[in-house]
Image: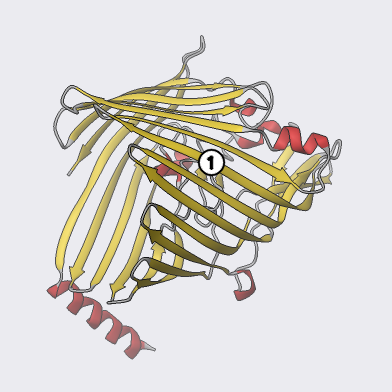
Amino acid sequence: MKNFYLVLLLLLFSFIIYADVEFRGFADSYHSVKTNKSLDYMTSKTRFRGELSFDLDDSFLFTSFNMEYNPLLKKQTNIGIREVFFEYTGDYFELKLGRQFITWGNSDSVRIIDIISPFDLSEFLARDYDDSKIPVTAIKLKYLYKMINLDLIFIPIADFNILSLDSNSPWYFLKSFPKNSKYQDEKPKRNLKNSEYGLKLAFYMHGIDFAFSYVNAFNKMPSFKSKIVNTDMLVIPVYNKMHIIGTEFSIPFKKIVFRGEFAFYKNETRQKKVPKKLETETKDAFNNLVGLDIFLENSLTISMQYSQKFILNANKVTNSEDNPLLLTLSISKKMFREKLLFSTFGYYDITNTGFFIRSYFEYNFTDSIHLLLGYNFVHAEKGAFALYDKNSEIWAKAKIYF
């Protein structure tokens, strides 16, 4: 075994010696204040990200890491690897091994088919979408043939959404449960049986792109069951494997792109409506989304999406409360010789009359120095947004690229 690791180390050293090396990254500092009378700090964190790549002919080695300091939530101060993968590109295939992002589907910030990589929800939706997504350790093989791509993926150890379990956080997840609740973190066993896998067949045709996919994976967002121990209620997350069969399409027409995703979820774990305790159940469901992107003159882009999930054999309460009609609207506009960007993205829960809107201005002093000022608005009386109804905030961020 020692000889094996020695040979592997020598091969890696040889690769690094002869490869083209590039180091890049950024540093940013983000701070936000609640917009109620208290003006409490919501977030205060500073981060450094480094990205190191080695490029040699058809081979590519990449790693990125984060160093973050958070004086408000000490548990989020950390140093960690974000991505690390090896990629080889042949004439008809690509092989990618390691910790990587896997993105399927064409929706924007609404997950229909793109359920492989989990999310960091420690700040709910207040983070940038790209910063919230979590890479997975996977083997990905892509077969390339003219206008057809076939993706095969295997994930030996599943990852799951990160929830806010720090009671000091304004995004504390357990505040929706009784005060005597305690969270008992349980994950599925790490064995071959609990590995995840999937395949995707994509066609890139003249005037239309479309794909079919299948995934066997866990629900990344848990449902919960409860158990009374003494005077405490233990809240236990429940993860189960489900089958997802999906299709997606994208049709461009002049300055408009019409797109959609449709998926069938087999054996999705859900919260069961039971008074005074937590129970789960499995249901089959159809999850659908249609979207429209409009690219106008003067760097103005408008995007709209409509999505709805249909639970099979569900009662009226489940359908109305847990499966809202969801509408999203995104507007972005570049101004002043593209130095100033205005962007807004909003979720509207039609069923529960809930809103989550994230808007900001970004000014580029140089290509390397960016300043951002934004506002996150949250309002709802019920539904997913109601838990954070008091968490509207104004925020500022400075970002330096190198």
Which amino acid is tagged 1? Val
Residue 323's image quarter?
Answer: top right
Residue 33 falls left or right of residue 146: right
Residue 380's place in the image compared with 196, above or below, is above
Q: Nearer the viewer, residue 265 or 397?
A: 265
Q: What residue is pinned by disc 1?
A: 290
Residue at 28% over, 36% down: 28
Residue 165's image quarter?
Answer: top right
Question: Is disc 1 placed on a helix, strand or loop?
Answer: strand
**From where the camera sits, is residue 77 visible?**
no
- Give coordinates of residue 14: x percent, y percent: 18, 79
Residue at 76% over, 52% down: 283
Residue 349's place in the image compared with 150, above or below, is above
- Give coordinates of residue 76: x percent, y percent: 45, 42
- Give coordinates of residue 229: x percent, y percent: 82, 46
Quarter of the image with the C terminus in it: top left
Q: Nearer the viewer, residue 356 or 123?
A: 356
Residue 92 falls left or right of residue 285: left
Quarter of the image with the N terminus in it: bottom left
**Image coloring type:** secondary structure
Residue 8's image quarter?
Answer: bottom left
- Give coordinates of residue 240: x percent, y percent: 69, 59
